[in-house]
Image (cartoon, rainbow, N blue to C red):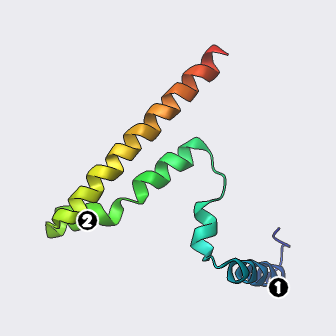
Amino acid sequence: SFRGSPEGLEKDFFLLKAYCCIHGLTILDLIKHLPMNPYQSLLNAVLEMEKDFEKFYDKSNAAAGTRVRKGLQNLKAKAQELRLDVQSKKTA
C-alpha cells in the first residue's frame, strides 16, 4: 500500500524487493502474476511480442518469426476466450 510520501514508497519498494528475494522471484515475475482486467491481459499479450516482431521484420530472424506465430496463436485463443466470456455475460 502506497503511503503517500517518498519515504513510504521507498519502504514499500524495500519490502517488495525483500519478498522477491525470499521467494526467489524478480519484481517482473510478480507483476506478470498480478490480477488484471481482460483488456490489460490482451494488451500485455500483444506487447510481449514486440521484440520478436522487430527481430523478424527488421532483422529477418526466422526463429523470431516462429515465436511471433506462436504468440499470435496464443493471442487468438485468448481472444476467443474473451469473446465467449463477453457473450456469457451479455446473456446472463
Mark 1: few/some/many CA within 10 Å (<14, 14-19, 20+): few
Q: Earlier in the sequence, mark 1 or mark 2?
A: 1
- Furthest-left residue in this view: 60
Give me the residue at 54% from left, 49% from top.
41
Pick the residue in front: 55 or 22.
22
* Left or right of 39, for residue 21: right
Give me the residue at 63% from left, 22% from top.
89
Mark 2: few/some/many CA within 10 Å (<14, 14-19, 20+): some
Give residue 7's mark. Answer: 1
Q: CA–CA distance between discs 1 and 2? A: 39 Å
**Amino acid under disc 2:** Glu
Image height of 75 relative to 61, above or below: above
Quarter of the N terminus within the rendering: bottom right
Q: Quadrant of residue 3?
A: bottom right
Give me the residue at 76% from left, 84% from top.
14
Give residue 33's mark. Answer: none
* Left or right of 22, for residue 42: left
Image height of 66 relative to 89, above or below: below
Helix, strand, or loop for circle 1?
A: helix
